[in-house]
Image (cartoon, grey):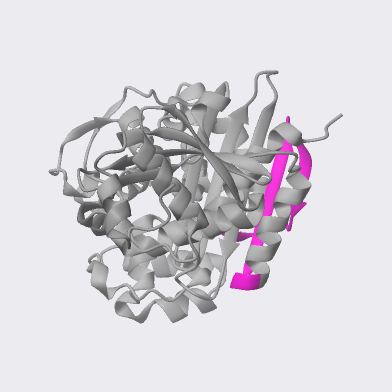
């Protein structure tokens, strides 16, 4: 089996082994090597990702599921990596030189790991990375696993589920229709993520299109358009903190446009609305004006319990099922997802329906005082939690 690319003999063997054998050996190297070398990866992959992310993911998987036990081929470019306490579906592709051009790990399956044991991954994350972590797993609305579920942490763009709920309720009441067409306004334009900020003024779009872009690719301009169309108060009916910022307002406060951030932070909710009114005509800041220090006072604070409540209400909407997040749709009857990130904040929230018809919510939020939190380690812990649900000891 291939252990390293340092040996010219081993490197030469890559060209005589079947492609699948080389892929299998590279996976073994990645999971067994003390140091994952950059030389394993093609320049094209290194331009899209960094080795540190791979290291963090593999470290997290081994920390949760134990050491490497073997690799089994499942199909073209697809494998199962067996660890001591579980297995990880993997996809890998190599170029003609035997270098990795694509590497992806799907939802791991924990052998015998219960949700309570999987929660330990988040506890360790909080201890090692600092800050606060909130986790909630529910089944049919009943708590199964919880860690600070009522703490209102900055959940980033996960708040957009409240915008979707306000819109879906408006449609249910007959006030609006998903097919209603609006013309894009300059006042709705925000900074990325998203694509609508690049679209021409007056481009016609439906409310359904805005909703789908807002959820599936977290389009900020689509979000701000819907908040304006629905009214801020309609969205605030589903969120505990007010006022609810548009994404453009967040960016302006983050960049401290017109020195408004300190005023906003020190103001009561009613006075904060006045600050936002003053910001309305201020231009959007350039992206490089946004410092990367956490600013929790201007985020979107939502508890894990409220996030589960939101996703349970909107999971059936088509917009929620375009992007499944990190869960494997093949393992579930239905998957709905919305996550969020901010400077020093990260969230994942997933609604899952199993083969018995039970509906699960798995949400986790991490806030730290450091902008560069370990998203790979968080994602690994989150995947382990989803993978553990089959082991849940439930009534």
- Which residue is outermost to the left? 200
Give residue 373's position: percent from left, percent from top.
50, 67
Give residue 167's position: percent from left, percent from top.
45, 33
Res 378 visible: yes
Q: Toward the viewer: 144 or 81?
A: 81
Q: Is residue 302 above or below residue 313?
A: below
Left or right for 315, reference 195: right
Q: Toward the viewer: 300 or 385?
A: 385
The residue drawn where x is 38% and y is 23% is 177
Give residue 192's position: percent from left, percent from top.
28, 54
> Which image quarter: residue 104?
top left
> Which image quarter: residue 131?
bottom right
The residue drawn where x is 50% and y is 28% is 329
User: Does the stretch in magenta take in 351?
Assistant: no
The image quadrant where one finds the C terminus is top right
| Magenta range | 128-156
User: Does the stretch in magenta take in 155?
Assistant: yes
- Which residue is outermost to the right? 395
Res 243 visible: no
Left or right for 2, reference 390: left
> Which image quarter: residue 95?
top left
Give residue 321's position: percent from left, percent from top.
46, 29
Left or right for 255, reference 338: left
Q: Toward the viewer: 183 or 25?
A: 25
- Which residue is outermost to the front? 9
Q: How many numbered discs sit on the rendered protein?
A: 0
Left or right for 242, reference 102: right
The residue drawn where x is 29% and y is 61% is 39
The residue drawn where x is 38% and y is 37% is 21
């Amino acid at each position: 089996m291939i252990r390293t690319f340092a040996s010219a003999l081993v490197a030469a063997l890559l060209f005589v082994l079947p492609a699948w054998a080389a892929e299998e050996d590279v996976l073994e190297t990645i999971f067994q090597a003390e140091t994952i070398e950059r030389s394993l990866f093609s320049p094209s992959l290194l331009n899209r990702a960094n080795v540190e992310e791979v290291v963090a993911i593999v470290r997290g998987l081994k920390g949760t599921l134990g050491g490497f036990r073997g690799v089994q081929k499942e199909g073209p470019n697809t494998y199962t990596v067996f660890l001591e306490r579980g297995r990880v579906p993997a996809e890998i592709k190599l170029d003609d030189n035997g270098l990795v051009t694509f590497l992806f790990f799907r939802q791991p399956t924990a052998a015998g790991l219960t949700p309570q044991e999987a929660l330990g991954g988040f506890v360790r994350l909080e201890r090692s990375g600092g800050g606060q972590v909130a986790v909630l797993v529910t089944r049919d609305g009943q708590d199964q696993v919880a860690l600070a579920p009522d703490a209102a942490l900055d959940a980033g763009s996960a708040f957009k589920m409240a915008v979707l709920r306000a819109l879906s309720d408006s449609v249910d009441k007959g006030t609006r229709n998903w097919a209603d067409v609006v013309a894009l306004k300059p006042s709705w334009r925000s900074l990325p993520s998203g694509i609508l900020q690049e679209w021409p003024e007056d481009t016609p779009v439906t409310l359904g299109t805005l909703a789908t872009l807002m959820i599936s690719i977290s389009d900020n301009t689509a979000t701000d358009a819907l908040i304006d169309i629905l009214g801020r108060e309609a969205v605030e009916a589903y969120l505990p903190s007010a006022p609810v910022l548009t994404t453009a307002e967040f960016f302006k406060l983050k960049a401290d446009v017109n020195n408004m951030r300190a005023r906003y932070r020190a103001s009561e909710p009613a006075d904060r609305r006045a600050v936002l009114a003053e910001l309305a005509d201020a231009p959007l800041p350039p992206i490089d004006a946004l410092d990367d220090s956490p600013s929790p006072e201007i985020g979107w604070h939502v508890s894990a319990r409220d996030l589960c409540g939101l996703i349970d209400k909107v999971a059936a909407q088509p917009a929620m099922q375009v992007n499944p997040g990190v869960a494997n749709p093949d393992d579930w009857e239905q998957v709905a997802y919305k996550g969020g990130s901010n400077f020093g904040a990260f969230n994942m929230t997933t609604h899952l329906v199993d083969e018995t018809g039970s509906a699960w919510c798995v949400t986790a939020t991490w806030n730290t005082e450091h902008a560069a939190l370990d998203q790979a380690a968080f994602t690994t812990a989150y995947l382990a939690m989803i993978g553990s649900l089959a082991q849940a000891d439930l009534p």
